[in-house]
Image (cartoon, coloured by chain):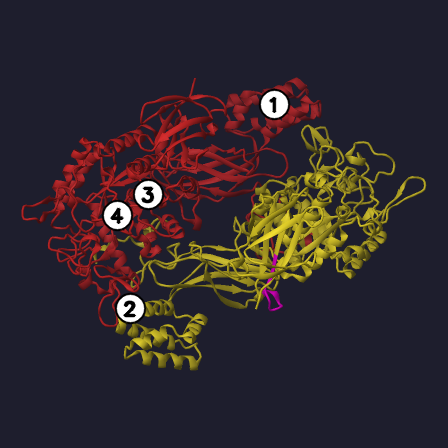
Chain colours: A yellow, B red
Amino acid sequence: MAARAGIRPSALRSPAEIPLRPGAAAPAEGALRTPRIPLIGGRPSVPGGFPAKAFSGEVVPFSVVAFREGHDIIGVHLRLTSPDGEESLHRLTPRKDGTDTWSVDIELGAQGRWMYRFEAFADDYATWAHAAELKVAAGVDVPVMAALGAELLTRAAAEKDRPAAQRKRLLADAAALAPGAAATTIALATDAELARIFADRPVVSLQSSTAAQSLIVERTAAGVGAWYEFFPRSEGARRLKNGTVKSGTFRTAAKRLPAVAAMGFDVLYIVPIHPIGTTNRKGRNNTLVTEPGDPGSPYAIGAAEGGHDAIHPDLGTAQDFRAFVRAAQGEGLEVALDLALQASPDHPWVTEHPEWFTTLPDGSIAFAENPPKKYQDIYPINFDNDPAGIYAEVLRIVRHWVAQGVKIFRVDNPHTKPLQFWEWLIATINHEDPDVIFLAEAFTRPAVMRALAAVGFQQSYSYFTWRNTKAELEEFLTSVSHETSDYMRPNLFVNTHDILTEYLQFGGRAAYRIRACIAATAAPVYGVYAGYELFENVARPGSEENNDNEKYEYKFRDWEGEEERGDSLAPLLRRLNEIRQQHPALRQLRNFSAHWSDDDQVLVYSKHLDAAFTGSGDDDTIIVVANVDPHSVRETTVHLDTTVWGVPLGDTFDVEDLLTGAHWTWSDHNYVRLDAFTEPVHILKVRKRA
Amino acid sequence: MAARAGIRPSALRSPAEIPLRPGAAAPAEGALRTPRIPLIGGRPSVPGGFPAKAFSGEVVPFSVVAFREGHDIIGVHLRLTSPDGEESLHRLTPRKDGTDTWSVDIELGAQGRWMYRFEAFADDYATWAHAAELKVAAGVDVPVMAALGAELLTRAAAEKDRPAAQRKRLLADAAALAPGAAATTIALATDAELARIFADRPVVSLQSSTAAQSLIVERTAAGVGAWYEFFPRSEGARRLKNGTVKSGTFRTAAKRLPAVAAMGFDVLYIVPIHPIGTTNRKGRNNTLVTEPGDPGSPYAIGAAEGGHDAIHPDLGTAQDFRAFVRAAQGEGLEVALDLALQASPDHPWVTEHPEWFTTLPDGSIAFAENPPKKYQDIYPINFDNDPAGIYAEVLRIVRHWVAQGVKIFRVDNPHTKPLQFWEWLIATINHEDPDVIFLAEAFTRPAVMRALAAVGFQQSYSYFTWRNTKAELEEFLTSVSHETSDYMRPNLFVNTHDILTEYLQFGGRAAYRIRACIAATAAPVYGVYAGYELFENVARPGSEENNDNEKYEYKFRDWEGEEERGDSLAPLLRRLNEIRQQHPALRQLRNFSAHWSDDDQVLVYSKHLDAAFTGSGDDDTIIVVANVDPHSVRETTVHLDTTVWGVPLGDTFDVEDLLTGAHWTWSDHNYVRLDAFTEPVHILKVRKRA
C-alpha cells in the first residue's frame, strides 16, 4: 500500500512522530501515551509524584477515569501488590455522576510500600449480554446474537485457568445457543450464575494498563489518634513558701498520666525537654526581662548542660525520661517529643559548630529575626553552610530519641527549614524505622503546608483552629477529607500553647464544647492542649495567645477540684474519646460527607463506614449536627443525603444521640433544636431498620 | 562523626533511602524530588503529560508555585527555548493571593515545539536591601548591614559577564559602604539604578530548577477564527419546473463566498463532499424511506463513484473543488473539510477491505447501532481488526485532502473512535505539516472531551450551545478560559446542522442576537451554521434538531432579500466580526474575567489585553454586558473589578458601546438597562483617561 511507505522510518523518529508497528497491529508498542482503553488520572496520588500515603486500617478509595469509544461495555481492575509482593485484583465500579470515574474502596493492612495500577478491558460478555437482551427481545438479529454468544462462551471455555466444571458448563451453554433460539439467548444473557462467573473472571479484550504507582501504608497512629499536650514542668510544680517554684519533673508529671489516659487519649505530646538557655531568656508573657525563677521558653534550646540530646536537669535524668515513657506506655499513651531545630546562644553547637549558624561580618552570630524585629533568645540554623554536617547531626538526634523509645515527633515550625531537608530526613528515618511519625507544625500558607505533607510529614496541624463558621468548616473538612487526603492528614488541635482563637476567647464554655465535639468526630486525629478542659480563655490583649503563656512560666491547675465542681470539660472529652473508640467510622479520614441545614450556623456532616470494613458485620454511621454559634439556641431542619449510608431518600431510620442517649426516628428531613448553653451538638448513631 | 557512618551506603539504596553526598553538601544530587527552593506544579501543563498548546500570537500565563523557608526573598525565572533553539529568560512576579504562585505573561510567536522550565533563586540583593532599609532606619545592626552590602556588591562586581561599567560602579558602591555609614547604606538599599541592575541580572544563590516541559505553538488559526458552515449542494440549488431539484455545485456555491467573506468570517466549513450511498439512504427528516430526488445524508459516505477521497459527482470534479478552495482563499476564507470516518454500505472499502468493519457470524457486516436501534445507512469502522491497514488508509485520505489545499478538518464524532488513533493520526500529520488543524465534534462527556483535546485536537466543539443562563455561562466561560486552556480550545458554535437548542427555538430573534454577541466576544473561535442569520428556529418536534434538516434535503434561502427586508442577522454578524478584527483582546482565550451584576440574568465579563501585546501601544479592554433573558427588559447595576484593566476601584473611565456608538462615563458600579427586544447586549470599549 502506497500510504504505508509514506510513514517515516523509525530512524527519523521524534516525539511528534509515531510509527506504526510493522506488520499487524498499530501503533508501535509504547509509542503512544494513550492506552487502547484510556485510563486517566488514577488516585490516590500526590502532586509532584511523591508516593501517596495511607495508614494501616484506612479504607482508601482507588479511582481512575476510564472510558472507551462507542457503546461497548468496559471493566476496570485495580492490581494491588502488597509490601511482601502478594498481588490482588479488585473490580472497580463506575460512579453515577457522568465523570467516567471508576472506583473501589480497599482497606489497606500491612505497613510498607504498596504498588498499584489500573487495568481496563473490553468486557465482552457484558457487552454481548446487554445487546442480546435488548435486541432479541425486540426481535432484532436473533440468530446472530445467539451465534455471537456461542462464540464468546466457547472462547471463555478455552481459557485453561478456569475451573474444569466451569469450562464444561460454558461449553454446554455455547452448544445450547447454537440452534439460535431466542428464549435460550435471552436466558443466557440474563443468567445470574453466568453473570457471577464473568464478574469474577471476565472474558476480556483490548487490555490496557496504567503505569505502577506507589503508596506507603504507615502504622495506624500516623492517621488515628487523640492527642493531649502538656508541659512536664508544670505537672507537679509546687510554689514554695519562699515564693519560688519547684519545677515539676518526669516523676511528678508521671502522676498525671493515669488521668490523661482515663480521658481516653492515645498520644501525649510534651514540649521540648532540653536544657534552656539563660542568655536573653524571655520572661513572663514574652517579655525581654526575666525575673529570678522564670524558667524560660523550652524552645530556647541548649545550655551548658547540653543541647537537643540532653534533658533539662529540672526534669530529671535520661533514666527518669525513659521511665516516664514506659509509664505512659503502661497507661496506653505514646509519648510525642518536640523537634525544634533552633538553638539558644548557650547551645553547645554555637561553640562547637558555629558553621551551622550565620556569622555576620562583625563576628557575631545572627539572631532569629523578622526585620527589624529580633528574637534574641534564639539562633536559627543555617542549613546551607555545612548541610552534610547539620543533616547528620539532626539525624543523630532523632535516632537518639528513637533509641529512648520515642517514635512520634511534633516538628516545630518546619516551614522555616528547607523543604528538601525534611524530604531527606523523613525518608532516611522511615527507611530504618517506618514506625516513626512526624507531625508538622505548619501554620503557614496553603502551598507550603501541602508541600510539607507531600514530601513526607505524616500529620499536619491544620487551619482547623481558624475555621469556625459553618461555611468555613464545611469547606475545610470537605477539602482535607477528599482533596488532599492522599498525602495530608490534618491533626485537628482545638488549641495549642500558642493559639487561643477569638472564637474560644469570646465563645464561653459552649465554644469549648462545640469545638471539642467537632474535632473529635470530623477527622481521625485531633488534639487538645492542657487547660482546654478548664476553659482557659484569657488571651494576652490583642493576641491570639494565652495570657500568662505556659511557655514562660509554670502553671498550677486543680484538675480534680475543677471536675468535682463541674467546671471541667474532662467528662465530655472522656465520652468523645469513648465514642471514637466504639465507632470505626470516626477513625477514618476520607469518609466525611457534608449535609444541608436551613440554618447558616448549623453544621451537619456524616461519617460512614461500610459493614465490609467495620469488623462488626454492621455499617457504622455517625451523623453530627452542631450549632456553631456559641451564643444562641437554634431550631432548624436538617436535610440528609441518606443514600450515603444506603437508606433510600424518604425512608425512616432510628438515631441515638451518643451524648445524651436520646432516641429519635429520622428520615431525610428532620427538625433539630440545639441550645448552645446546654446541648449544642448531636452525635447520632444511625440504626437502620431490618 | 559517628552519625555519618550510620548513613547507609549507596549500594543498598532504595527509593526510601537517600544518601548524603560524600564530602561537603548534602544530599546527593538528584536523589531528592524537592529542589533547594521548591518549585511546584508549573503551568501551562496538560493532565497525562501531553505537551501544552498555544497558538502563534497567544499571550500565555506561565506560572509556578515557589517559596522558601524563612523571610529571605526569592526570585523566579522562566527559561524559554524557542523552536529554533533561542533561549530567553523572563522574570516572574508573585501573585498577591496567598497561593505562592508566581507568573509572567508571554506572547508566543514562532510555530513549533518550545521548551520551558522554571528556575528559582535566593535574590541576595533584594533580601539585603529589604533588611538594610528596615534595620538601618531602626538603628539596628548598622555596621553589619553596611558590611554585608559591601560583601554582596563586591561579589556581584566579580561576575565577569556584567558590563565593565556596571562592575566598576558596583565596586565603587562597595567601597562607599565600607565606612559603615547609615545614610550610605539606606541610599544604596533604595537606589533605583541598583534595583534595575539587579532586576535585570540578580545576584543569586541556591539556584533551583524544574524539569523542562514542552509546549507546542500552533498557527494562529488553531486558536482564532470566525467559522461559517454551509452545505455546498444547497448553495445554488434550483427547483426545476418538473419539481425536481438541481443540486448546487462547487461553481454555484462559490458565488456565495463573497457574501460569507463580507460578513467577516475566516473559515468556511463544508459538510462531507463525497459520494453518498444509496443503500438504505435516509429520506427527509431522517425517515427510512426516500422519495425520488432525496439527496441523502452526506455522512453516509461512499458509493460506486468512490469513498473518502472522491467527490460527489453532483458537486463537480476534483478540479472544481480545487478552484472552490482557491476562490475561498481569494476571499480570505480557509476551507475546512469534514472527516467522518464511517461508510455507507456502498463504500468501496466494504468490498475491498471488509476487515475494516465487523463481520457477523451470518456473514453480514454490522450496521451502526445503539441496541436495539440500528442505523442502516452506515457501517462503523472496526479499528481493531486491522489497525495498521485502517490507520494507514485514514492517513492517506487526510494527506490526499491536504494535497488538495485543505488544512482544517472538522472531525465527526471523534469519541466513537479509539482515542489512541487520534493521538497517532494528529501527531503523524502535524509532524509532516504542523499547519493542519483538527476540530473535534466531541459532544460527549467532559472526561472524553478533555481527553480528545489533550491527545492533540486543536479545537473542540464545546458545551456552549447548552450553556444559556448567566450562572451556566459564567462557570463555563471561566472554566474553558482558565482551567483547561492549556490544551482545550472551545469553538463556540451558536448552532450546527444537528443542534437547534430550546433557547433558540423559543427565544425569538433576541435569543439569536444574544448568543451571537456572546459567542463572538467570549472566546477567540466561534462559529455559525448557515440559516442562523435568518432566525431558522423550527425544530423537528421533540428534538433539538432543525425540522426539515438540511442533512436530508436541499435548502433554498433568500439571503439578500431577507437582509433587504431587515429580517437578517447578517449586519450584526458583520459588525461582530469587524469588532473582533479591531480588538486584539477578543482574539485571546485566557484573558476572560467574569464580573458581577445584581440581576441573575445579566451576564458581565471583560476581555483585557495589556498594551505590551496589542501592537497599538494601548491597552485593549472590552466589557460585555448581556441580558441573557430573551423575553424581558432588565435594569440593574453591574459591579466591575476595574483593577483587571489597571483602573483603581472608584476611579471613572469612558466606555463606548461598539454596537450603538453610545458613550458613557463608568466606574466600578454602573447602572445598565438592556432591552432584549432592541438592544440586549452592550459591547463596551474602555477608554482610560490620561
Instruction: Report the chain holding disc 4.
Output: B
Q: Which mark is residue B189?
A: 1
Point out the stretch of residues depicted in magenta.
A613-622
Q: Are marks 2 and 4 in contact (CB under 8 Å)?
A: no
- Residue B256 on image: x %, y %: 16, 37
B641 on left or right of A157: right
**What amino acid is labelled 1 in the image?**
Ala
Q: Mark 4, residues whose alpha carbon is within 10 Å: few (<14), some, or many (≥20)?
A: some
Do the dots labelled 4 and 1 sit on one chain? yes
SS at badge 1: helix
The residue beneath circle 2 is A138
From the image, tell me which residue sits under label 3. Answer: B503
The C terminus of chain B - image quarter: top left
Q: Amino acid at mark 4?
A: Ala
Q: Are marks 3 and 4 on the same chain?
A: yes
Mark 3 neighbour class, 10 Å CA radius: few under 14, some 14 to 19, many 20 or more: many
Mark 2 and mark 3 in contact? Answer it, CB < 8 Å.
no
Where does label 4 land, which residue? Answer: B539
Give the Cα distance between marks 3 and 4: 11 Å
* Mark 2 crowd level (few <14, some 14–19, many ≥20, 10 Å Cα): few
Q: Label 4, label 1: how many angstroms apart (C-alpha)?
A: 72 Å
Which one is in front, B243 or A460?
B243
Judged from this view, the residue extending furthest toward the right is A241
Q: Quadrant of residue A147?
A: bottom left
Query: What is the distance, in whole Å, between disc 1 and disc 2 at their CAs?
Result: 85 Å
